[in-house]
Amino acid sequence: MRRALTIDTSSAHTIVGVVEDGEIIWSGEIEGATSHGGALGELVSRVEGVAEVDHVIVGIGPGPFTGLRVGIIFAQGFAKARGIPWIGVVSLDAIAQSLKLSRDTVISLDARRKERYWARYDEKSQRISEISISKVDQVPSGIVDAFPTPLGLFRAANNPRSIRTEPLYLRKPDAALAPLTSIHLRELRTFDLGEILSIERGLFPDPWTLGQFKEELHSVPRSRYYVVLEDQSGAQPRIVGYAGIAFTGGGEPVDIHTLGVAKEFQGRGLGQRLLDHLIERALTLGASSVLLEVRDGNEPARALYAKNGFTEISRRVGYYARFGDALVMEKPLHSTDVHQ
């Protein structure tokens, strides 16, 4: 038997249920964005079949800090008291698993402050984009303010891509971030790959494997160039970003093969710093332009590239298999593209 207590407090609804082997045994919900604590206690006191629960599933966001904390702390405490495991899942994924979707569907939730959390899903309810927070008028149309069901949470817990251990708050802090004074750029080395893989898996729905990175580095310096950004402010240096290009010769385009910044360091200009460096390197190599491929659903990356003069020149339909189309973008190079 597999019987789960399911909990979600990522939205304006507090949702609790018991699911056994894919069948709902009991479910209940209470509406109220500021009353998750009381609502959760009330619902759990009414749960039927809780004595036989052998694991707990909890929505891990995206959502407001206070609401998520209530559900996650309760789930952890309940699981610890019973000596059973708990599983955190992406709440948007649980919504997708609760619905019958058509191809390329956007699901979004109110994030308050005139913003929404959102992501794209395919007809099999699989996420095909990053999870984002955007101003209301910048979110593509789709399904708005649906909520996870106990069965959706249960299904998400059986999808490895939906499982997370850390809450997804997403919203940037209101206070200004402290300047990063100890970030240094250097060439990537093989022993960096452990840290890079950890960042890669947290950023992309289709992360590169260790073998792919090793294959790229095998061509350094003949036709590849890879760098990392390293935070040296702590006792041990820490990689916080990385990027790389492929090149053939003077007068030919340079291809950006990858560019990523650890989530907790995003919003501080590090992606721009990496992009500036790659463009400068391309100019040094005598490249005619810089090319790249980006998932159609990766809106933050597309915005960064568009801001830097990249324009879409073609689309590769189904390039990322389960994760959607690839947009090919290009930036012609001129001497004025060097950033001072």
Image: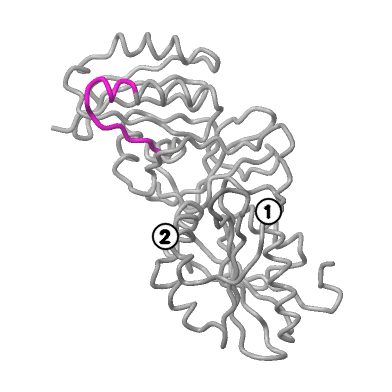
| N-terminal-most mark, 2 or 1 | 1
**At label 2, which amino acid type do we have?**
Arg
The magenta span reads 77-89
Residue 284 point in image, percent of width and height: 74, 82
Residue 36 point in image, percent of width and height: 47, 16
Report the front residue among 130 and 184: 184
Q: Is residue 79 magenta?
A: yes
Q: Which residue is label 1 attached to?
A: 182
Residue 279, located in which quarter of the rendered image? bottom right
Question: Disc 2 vs disc 1: Cβ atoms closer than 8 Å?
Answer: no
| Crowd class of label 2 (few under 14; some 14 to 19; many from 20; radius 10 Å) | some
Residue at (48, 58) in percent of width and height: 200
* Colouring rule applied to residues: one colour
Residue at (62, 77) in percent of width and height: 255
**At label 1, which amino acid type do we have?**
Ser
Residue 34 point in image, percent of width and height: 55, 14
Q: CA distance from mark 2 to mark 1?
A: 39 Å
Q: Which residue is label 2 attached to?
A: 322
* Dot 2: element: helix
